[in-house]
């Protein structure tokens, strides 16, 4: 599978932004690093993008996850239920980013592509709308809240396009 063409994040027209392209790029790099690490199965680098007390409306959890302990509990539950469909690639795209001081708001889409099922059946990609809130502390941006909304459930038989 070829890598998607890079997409440049852009500044929202909301008037919230008080920072320049450097901050916008830094914020977007945190979001894309999260999915690169997730795709590589690198939990340590996933966690490095998240504030330890980050909250998350995770697509696999009914309740709000509050901090690393809740996220680790979800990870353990996922492991206990066995592997699901194998993720082939994550593609975060179409970001709209506002930066104001030490806070940033990112709205973006995420496509999750899956490897074919063991019998060769193509699995439908998952399409997700996301909102992330980031905070800069000691010159490092980290996600303090992530909200996922699945628009098209994936990892099930269907078209792979």
Image (cartoon, rainbow, N blue to C red):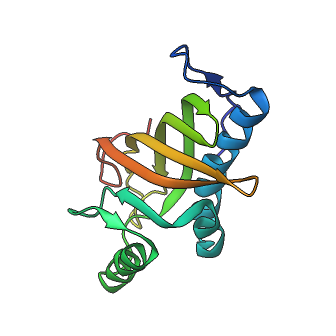
In this view, 19 is above or below 91: above
> Residue at image x 37%, y 54%?
121
Tell me where residue 22 sits by quadrant.
Answer: top right
Percent position of residue 104, x then y: 57, 38
Drawn side of residue 104 relative to residue 112, left or right = right
In this orientation, which residue lies closer to the viewer: 34 or 116?
Answer: 34
> Residue at image x 31%, y 44%?
150
Drawn side of residue 102 relative to residue 72, left or right = right
Percent position of residue 46, x then y: 59, 66
> Residue at image x 48%, y 41%?
110
Toward the right, the furthest residue is 22
In this view, 70 is above or below 40: below
In this orientation, which residue lies closer to the viewer: 55 or 117?
Answer: 55
Q: The C terminus lies in which quarter of the figure?
A: top left
> Residue at image x 62%, y 21%?
11
In this orientation, which residue lies closer to the viewer: 112 or 102?
Answer: 102
In this view, 102 is above or below 84: above
In this view, 41 is above or below 7: below
Drawn side of residue 141 relative to residue 119, left or right = right
Percent position of residue 146, x then y: 43, 51
Percent position of residue 13, x then y: 55, 13
Q: How many marks?
A: 0
């Amino acid at each position: 599978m070829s890598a998607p063409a890079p997409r440049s994040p852009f500044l929202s027209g909301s008037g919230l932004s008080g920072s320049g392209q450097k901050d916008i790029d830094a914020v977007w790099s945190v979001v894309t690093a999260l999915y690169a690490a997730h795709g590589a199965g690198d939990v340590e680098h996933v966690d490095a993008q998240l504030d330890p007390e980050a909250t998350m409306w995770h697509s696999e959890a009914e309740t709000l996850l509050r901090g690393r302990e809740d996220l680790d509990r979800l990870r353990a539950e996922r492991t206990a239920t066995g592997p699901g469909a194998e993720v082939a690639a994550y593609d975060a795209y179409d970001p709209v980013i506002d930066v104001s001081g030490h806070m940033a708001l990112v709205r973006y889409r995420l496509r999750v592509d899956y490897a074919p099922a063991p019998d060769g059946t193509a699995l439908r990609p998952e399409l997700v709308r996301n909102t992330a809130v980031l905070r800069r502390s000691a010159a490092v941006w980290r996600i303090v809240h992530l909200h996922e909304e699945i628009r098209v459930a994936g990892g099930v038989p269907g078209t792979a396009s």
